Image (tube, helix red, strand yellow):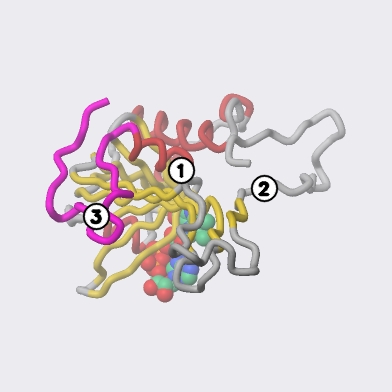
Amino acid sequence: METKPQTDFVRARRMHERGRYDEATIHAVLDAAPVCHVGHLIDGRPVVIPTFHWRDGDVVYWHGSAASRMLRANARGEEVCLTATLLDGFVLARSGFHHSVNYRAAMCFGVPRLVTDTAEKLGALKGFMERLFPGRWDGLRPITAQELKATSVLALTISEASAKLRDAPPGDDPGDETWPIWGGVLPVHLAAGAPQPDRYATADQLPPATPFT
Ligand SMILES: Cc1cc2nc3c(=O)[nH]c(=O)nc-3n(C[C@H](O)[C@H](O)[C@H](O)COP(=O)(O)OP(=O)(O)OC[C@H]3O[C@@H](n4cnc5c(N)ncnc54)[C@H](O)[C@@H]3O)c2cc1C
């Protein structure tokens, strides 16, 4: 997989050995995280909004109401910073100082564009649904022209990106390993609860599975 030029701006400083700059790693983090945060400026003020995202090749998409301040701001041709984070585990050391977390995170930079081509927009929205619930799109009541108009889709071709990963046991100071307290990793996972059918769902209609749990 192609490796992005590792610009100085995206070079990890602290714990730099955890930094990754190859597309495969960055894409894998984006794909594994259900939700991202989009950072942008509104009247010169930083705003970071949680939103769903999905990816096709080197393009990351997100969507929302055409009236959304975020979506309108993101379509203005200004750079955004899109981050995706997965908490994989709490890392408990024998000292407070060396407690840590196992995680996967990606930060992507670039100037998004508003998707105006109808076919691309429809394909992107299908990609969004299929990422969350594979196979669900084709069974849905088809989207109307009004719904499509009321929905904006942003596309970000990643121009610079980094990932940062930790997947390791605690790193106690020499001599602390036998301190009389538990050390190790408490793994953390996203888990689906029991489905809650609404009053119209019939017994023969099964809830979909999602790859995120
Ligand atoms: C897990 C998750 C997934 C989401 N997915 C989507 C999505 O796919 N598409 C989508 O359009 N929206 C999504 N949202 C909602 C999104 O975070 C915004 O609330 C929404 O986009 C409204 O944006 P806006 O432009 O109207 O808000 P703005 O007008 O930009 O916000 C105005 C102010 O409202 C407050 N505000 C806005 N959103 C939030 C928030 N989430 N939490 C706390 N304060 C807030 C802030 O103070 C902000 O400055 C998601 C939220 C969550 C938590």
Q: Amino acid at mark 2?
A: Ala
Q: Which of marks 2 and 1 precedes in the sequence?
A: 1
Secondary structure, mark 3, is loop
**Above or below, 20 relative to 75:** above
Label 2 vs label 3, nearer the camera:
3
- Does the beta carbon of the residue at mark 2 sit less than 8 Å from ligand 1? no
| Amino acid carrying mark 1 in the image | Gln
Given this view, does label 1 or label 2 mark the residue nearer the observer? 2
Q: Helix, strand or loop at disc 2? A: loop
* Magenta-colored span: 1-24
**Residue at the image position 47 percent from the left and 62 percent from the top:** 172
The answer to whether the residues at label 1 and label 3 have Cβ atoms under 8 Å apart is no
Q: In the shown orientation, is residue 153 left or right of residue 11?
A: right
The stretch drawn in magenta includes residue 23: yes
> Which residue in the structure is indicated by mark 3?
12
The alpha-carbon separation of the residues under discs 2 and 3 comes to: 31 Å
Q: Which residue is mark 1?
A: 146
Q: Is mark 3 within 8 Å of ligand 1?
A: no
Image quarter for ligand 1 equals: bottom left
Q: Is residue 181 above or below residue 16?
A: below
